[in-house]
Image (cartoon, rainbow, N blue to C red):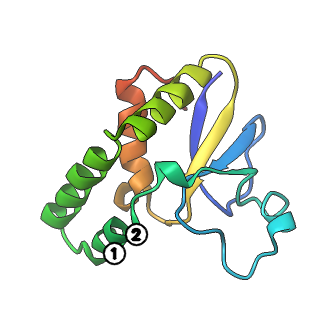
Amino acid sequence: MAIRIVRLGSPRAAGEGLRLGTVRRPPRGVPKDEFASRDFYDVWLPALSPSAELIKDAQAANGDKAWAAFGRKFRAEMKAPDAARLLDLVAALSHQTDFSLGCYCEDEARCHRSVLRELLEERGALLR
């Protein structure tokens, strides 16, 4: 049992399980009934994505210092009670079933999912 961190839209791995989309917006130009069949996500979970303002900061981050500032701000957003409880739930579920979560970004190192990975690890989640 474990969580796999993925790029949404990438081909699914064997045994990946349910795919959670931790993005602020659904994929453009894709009919809602095709999100899963096109390997985007089965369930949309925007509560684990950065706020719209913070997404702009992430997209503008052009160096390590700016990216670190984004990471601190996103961690602060994820300390909100609802987000923190959701992270706790996702971490706990990782001990019961296989599933994945992801975002559209090409490079995980410059994507909020890298911070999600750290936050889940800190909560004892099982990750692949």
Relative side of 120 to 53, left or right: right
At 59% across and 33% down in the image, what residue appears? 3
Which image quadrant is residue 111 in?
bottom left
CA distance for labels 2 and 1: 7 Å
Please state, as top left, top right, bottom left or bottom right, where the C terminus lies in the image.
Answer: top right
Q: Which residue is mark 1?
A: 56
Q: Residue 125 in the image: state x and y as whole percent.
A: 48, 24
Residue 5 visible in image: yes
At 50% across and 34% down in the image, what residue appears? 86
Q: Which mark is residue 89?
A: none
Disc 2 crowd rating (10 Å Cα; few below 14, some 14-19, many 20+) is few
Q: Residue 37 in the image: state x and y as whole percent.
A: 85, 60
Disc 1 crowd rating (10 Å Cα; few below 14, some 14-19, many 20+) is few
At 19% across and 56% down in the image, what residue appears? 68
Q: Which residue is mark 2?
A: 52
Q: Give above or below for 41 relative to 90.
A: below
Q: Amino acid at mark 2?
A: Ala
Give the number of callouts.
2
Residue 127 visible in image: no
Foreground mark, 2 or 1, reads: 2
Q: For the residue labelled by badge 1, is the local secondary structure a helix, a strand or a loop?
A: helix
Q: Residue 121 in the image: state x and y as whole percent.
A: 40, 28
Which image quadrant is residue 75 in?
top left
Q: Amino acid at mark 1?
A: Lys
